[in-house]
Amino acid sequence: MKTLLLGGDVWFADRTVKKDCAVLWEDGTILAVGDACNGVMPDHIVNATGMTVIPGLIDVHTHGRAGYDFCTANVEEMKKMKLDYACHGVTSVFATLASGTVEEWTRAIRNIQAAGFEGIHFEGRYLNSQKRGAHAAELLAKPNAAELEEFLKQIDIPCHVSAAFELDEDGSFAETARRYGATMGLGHTAATAEQTRVAIERGVRSFTHLYNAMPPLHHREAGPVGVAFCGGGYGELIVDGMHICPEMVALAYKCLGEDRTVLITDSMEGTGCPDGTYSIAGQPVYLKDGRAVTGDGALAGSTLDLWDGVKNLMKFAGASFADAVACATVNPARMVGIDKTVGSIEPGKRADLLLIDDCMDIAIIYNGGELV
């Protein structure tokens, strides 16, 4: 069935917005945009007058929501999560695994693929114990190329690997990730600036929740933050007002710019749920008033919705609407290598569309061409 959207102001990946622009899709794939839609006889018309049309949001770093965690949820629970993400505008998800046992990760990898997520993000096990944050110490392991290969052999979807790459002394862990086509991020790290540069030479292309769980910027040792600011790759930011204060969000955005900033949620299973006790990475988490912490007070993920992160970036850093949208769509897609299929509104890409009203709320959601 051909569906034609009419009257909307459509956002493009070059940060332009074309007024009164048509979008045509069929069987979940965009066929044409703009004047190329002229003369088409659709089966269904969507009136988007007064709306801004943007791609579905992409969260490449999220551990769960709706009461479930990717490490422990079964396939049916993951399908409920997938729908809940879509209902909040997130149409592409890299299911993120916090620290767990080999058995837990093996089971989770199988379930994530069966549930139909876009990718897997390993953000656990291979972390520096000095910067473990909410991850249980007993679940950490030194970067092990053979172990990583056993995991990657099981994966048929894109994969992103976060690790403390300063612990990958001979570079074999990074080389294995590269060989299997995985992208890499430096995170939960105590790396110096020099160690960070070595990691980049070995293929690391992003910084996992920049600022958080890494050495702070210092005037005699720039560390990962300084290298990121000077052009080291993409920087993930949790823009919930808790993980990073507004001024430091503004500084990061000023340095990274609109092309290297990637908005993430790092959300945990309590997202969208009432206050109470939850868990992540082998530890209990206490959620109250939107703040999730471990027993010793460490932040344990967030309860942020990604669309709120977009609006917060505009508020905290003065980002334009068009640039803030890029930070939650095309930028993360490019960071993890899925930009050929999602992240922008172009022929051949999946028909993931959000219709934004004049109050900056998500009014209508299409995921793969289907109304959510």
Image: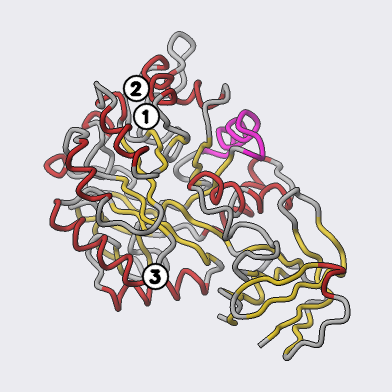
Name the residue carrying label 1. Answer: 214
Q: Label 2 sits on what residue type?
A: Ala
Tell me the tag on residue 116.
3
Q: Badge 1: few (under 14), some or many (20 or more) residues near its Cα, within 10 Å?
A: many
Circles 1, 2 touching at the beta carbon (< 8 Å): yes
Q: Residue at x 40, y 22 (%)?
A: 196
Badge 2 is on which residue?
A: 191
Mark 3, residues whose alpha carbon is within 10 Å: few (<14), some, or many (≥20)?
Answer: some
Question: Is residue 249 found inside the magenta-colored segment of the image?
Answer: yes
Residue 251 is drawn in which quadrant? top right
In the structure shown, which secondary structural element does the residue marked by tag 2 occupy? Answer: loop
Residue 140 included in the magenta stretch of the image: no
Part of the protein shown in magenta: 245-259
Q: Would residue 50 be visible to someone looking at this image?
A: no
User: Residue 166, percent across and down?
Assistant: 30, 24
Rounded to the nearest angstrom, the CA distance separating label 1 from label 2 is: 8 Å
Q: Residue at x 66, y 40 (%)?
A: 258
Quarter of the image that includes the C terminus? bottom right
